[in-house]
Image (cartoon, rainbow, N blue to C red):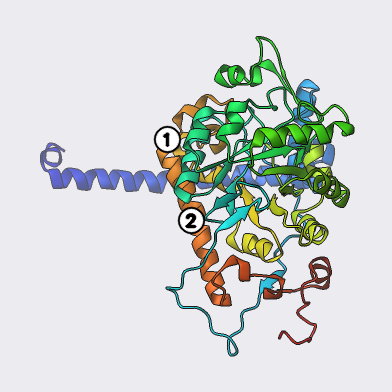
Amino acid sequence: MQLIMDNPVGLILFLSLLVLAAVLLVKPFFRYIIKKVTNDVLRKILTNQYTRNIVEMLPILKHFSVLNLIELNLRAEEGKVIARPLGSPKHFRGFENLMFIPRQMTKLSLYESTPVDMSVTIGSNAEKPLSITIPFMISAMAYGTGLSENAKMALAKASNRLQTAICSGEGPVLPEEQQEAYRHVLQISRWSWGERTDGQIDAADMLEVQMGQGADLGTSRIEENEIAGRARILGGLAAGQPGIALPAPPGIRQIEDWPDFMKNLRQRAKGKPIGLKLMATDNIEEDLAAAVDLGFDAIVIDGAQGGAHASTPIKQDDFGIPSLYALIRAKRFLGNQNISLIVTGGFFTPGQCLKALALGADAIYLATVPLFALAHKQTDKAMPWEPITTLVFYDSPAKIRLNVEQAATNVANTLKSMVLEMQEAMRALGKASLKELGPEDLVALDSVTAEVTDVKYVLDNRSLS
C-alpha cells in the first residue's frame, strides 16, 4: 500500500479502480431505487381514483390553461383587480397569410448597392411635420408607471442613434429623455399630470393625445406604493395620493369640450403635429370621423394585440379588434385625407411591419421588440430567479442593474437589423422607396384574408399586370 501511495501513477490507478468499483456497486442500487419509485408512482397514477390522484390536474388543464389557473389563484390571494403585463396571450388573425409577390422575368430586382429610402414624414399638414429616417418609432412606454429611468434613457439614446422618434408614454415626463431623444413625441395623457407644462410641450417634436391603447382604456388606479421616488415628484403627486387615470385628458369632462381643448392645444403646439391614440374597436369609423373633424394631423391605432405594463386581463383579452382589421378599416376611412396613420400592437418581425406599410400604414410603433432588446447580454443579472423584465420596470429593485449604454446599443442594433432586412425585401421587389410599396405587392393565401384586405387571393387567376 505504501508503494502505491509513493508512486503517483500507481495512486491514480488505485483511485481509478476504487471509483470503478464504487460505480459498479452503486449503479445497481440506484437502478433498483429508480425502478421502485417509478413503479410505485405509475401504480398510483394508474389505479388511484381521480379525487386522490395527482394527475387530476391533466383534465383540468385541458379544460382551462395554466394561465387561467395562475390568474385564478392570484385573484384568490387578495380579492383585488390583477394587473397582467405585456398584453393578451390570445392569437388573432394577422399578416401571416399575406405574402409578397416579386416579379422575376418581367422586372428585375435592384442591385444590392441600391439605396432604399425608408424615411417617413408624420403630420405633413402641420407647419412643423415630424421627419424620421426609418418607419419605426419607439412606442409609448411610460416612465414611473411602467419603465425605469435607465430603461427610458436607453430607449432615448437608441432613438438618437436610429434618427427616429420615441414616445413619452402616459407617465410623468422624464426631462433627460426629452433632451436625449432624436425626436420626442409627448403624450397628453389621461392622468392628473397629463396636461403637461408649456416647457414640456416646447421640448417635444409632436404631441399625442391618448384616449386608449390596445390593452387599456378608461379609468384605473395606481396605489401610492406603486409609484414612488422621482416619478411621484415629477407627476406632482402629494404624499399618500394615488395616481388616478381619467376618462379623458385633463380639460375634457364632456364630449362638447373637445373643440376648445384642441384649439388650446393647437396654440400650445406652435405648429407641431398633433396625433390621437385610440384603442382599435368596431366603432373605429365613428372615432376617426370625430378625429378628422377636430383636425388631428395623425392617428395612432393600437390593435388588440397591444400590451400595457399593468392592465386587467379582461381589457387585454376581451376589448378591441386585431391590428390587421383596424389598419384596413382606418385606411379605407381616411382615404387620401393626408392624415398620417401609425399602427401598433403585435408587430414583432420585419415581414409583419413591411406588410403593414404596404397596406397603408405610414409608420409602425414598436414596444415589445425594443423592450426585450434592452436586456440583451444582461439577462444573467436577473435570471434564473427573476424575469428579465425586472431589469426595466420602475417598481423593481433590480432596475439599477441595467447598463444604459449596452441597452441602447441593443435596441439600436435590433431595429437597424429589422430595417436592413426590410430594405433587402424592397430590393427584391424592385422598389427603391417606401412610397413605391402598395397592396399590389401582396397576395393572400386564404379567402378570408383576401376579403379583409382587398388583396388578390392566390387562387384567383386574374392578371397581375
Residue at image x 58%, y 90%? 105
Residue at image x 79%, y 36%? 217
Residue at image x 56%, y 36%? 389
- In the rendered image, residue 197, in percent from the top left (x then y), is placed at 63, 25
Q: Quadrant of residue 135?
A: bottom right
Pick whichever, 340 or 384, lies toward us.
340
Q: CA distance from mark 1 to mark 2?
A: 20 Å
**Res 60 visible:** no
Pick whichever, 296 or 371, lies toward us.
296
**Res 330 visible:** yes
The vertical placement of 340 against 73, above or below, is below
Circle 2 Cα neighbour tier, 10 Å, few/some/many (<14 / 14–19 / ≥20): some
Assign the C terminus to one quadrant of the image.
bottom right
- In the rendered image, residue 275, in percent from the top left (x then y), is placed at 70, 44
Q: Which mark is residue 403?
A: 1
Q: Is residue 220 left or right of residue 364?
A: right
Q: Which mark is residue 416?
A: 2
Pick whichever, 224 or 28, lies toward us.
224
- In the rendered image, residue 443, in percent from the top left (x then y), is placed at 72, 75
The vertical placement of 175 against 362, above or below, is above
Q: Dot 2: what SS? A: helix
Residue at image x 67%, y 16%? 224
- In the rendered image, residue 141, in percent from the top left (x then y), is placed at 62, 37
Q: Looking at numbered disc 2 in the image, what kind of residue is underneath it? A: Lys
